[in-house]
Image (cartoon, rainbow, N blue to C red):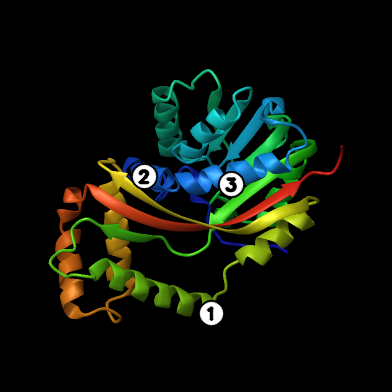
Amino acid sequence: MSHTHGHDPHHSGHGVFDDERVALMIGAEGESAGPLTAEAIERATAALRGGRDDVRRVADLGCGPGVEACALATAFPAALIVALDGSPAMRAAAQRRVGEAGLSARVEVGAIDLDGDLSSLGAFDLVWTAQALHHLRDEAATLARVAALLRPGGVLCVLERLDPAELVASDDLGRPGLWERVAGAQAAWHADRSASAPATGLEGYAALVGEAGFGVVDSGPLRSVATLEGSPGAAPLVARYVQGALRNLTDRLDPADIEALRALDGGGSARVSHLEVRQSRTLVIGRAPGA
C-alpha cells in the first residue's frame, strides 16, 4: 500500500513549516497534546520487551519543535533521543526547547530527509513519529526503511491526526457559543471532504505498519482536552484556526459569526491568553521481529 502526497514540508526545508511563527504554533499544539503524548508513551513502553531503563536509543522522526522529544527524554532517562526534522526553523525551535528543559546532553537535534536513506542513523530501541508520515511521498517505503533501524523486538510508535483540532478561546467575540458552532461546522466540512477523498485512517496506518514487517501490537484512537495559559504559540494557533474557518466555512456559519472571526483575524488573536484545545490522534504501535 503506497500513499503519495506530493509534498514533504517536514523534510524539504522550505514552505510553510520553515517559519518561526509556524514552529511556535506547532509547539503550542504539541504542548496541548501532552496527555495524548503521555498515553502513547505508556502504550509504547508496554510493547517493549524490557523496562524503561533498558531503552538506550530513541529516534523522533519529524520531531518538529521538540515537544515530544523532550517528553521521550523524560520518560526514558537512560536513553539518548535523536530528534530529526527537515525544517531549519523546526530544528532551531527544538534546540531551544531542549536547552530550556536542560536536556541537551541527552537529546541530539539533527536534519533528515524522511524520503531518503536512513541507514546512517544507527540502531534504535524505539522509533517515534508523530504527524509526519502523511507528508511523505511514499509512506510505505519510509516505514520499510524505519523497520531496518530497529533492534530485534524494537518498537515503532506512529501518531497521526484523527479529527480536526477544536479550539475554544476565552473570548467569544460577543457571539455566545461561537467556538462550538465553528467546531460543528468544521466537523461537517471535514466529513464531506473525507467522503470524497478518504484519509489513510486507523486501518490504513495499521496495514502500512504491518506491511513494513512489524507485528501490530496496539492501535486505536486517542483523545485529549487541555488548556493553554499564556503560551506564545496560542495566538498563532488561534490565527491558523480562524483562517481555516474563513477559508472553508463561510457558507456554513452565520454571517455575524463570520464577521466576528474576520475581526479576530485582523489582529485580535494576540489577546487570546486562555485557550482550550481538543485533539485526537490515530495510534499504531508495531514491534520489529526478533527476541
Q: Amino acid at mark 2?
A: Ala
Nearest the eye: 145 or 239: 239
Left or right of residue 278, residue 132 in this image: right
Provide the secondary structure element on which disc 3 rests: helix
Q: Position of residue 236 (x, y in %)?
A: 28, 50
Q: Position of residue 219 (x, y in %)?
A: 67, 57
Sooner in the amino-acid sequence: mark 2 or mark 1 = 2
Question: Mark 1 Cα within 10 Å, few/some/many (few <14, many 20+)?
Answer: few
Q: Position of residue 81 (x, y in %)?
A: 59, 29
- At x 35%, y 69%, the residue is 183
Q: Which residue is mark 3?
A: 40
Question: Mark 3 Cα within 10 Å, few/some/many (few <14, many 20+)?
Answer: many
Q: Amino acid at mark 3?
A: Ala
Provide the secondary structure element on which disc 1 rests: helix
Q: Which residue is mark 2?
A: 28
Closer to viewer: mark 3 or mark 1: 3
Q: Which mark is residue 195?
A: 1
Position of the C terminus, as image quadrant, is top right
- At x 29%, y 47%, the residue is 234
Nearest the eye: 41 or 267: 41
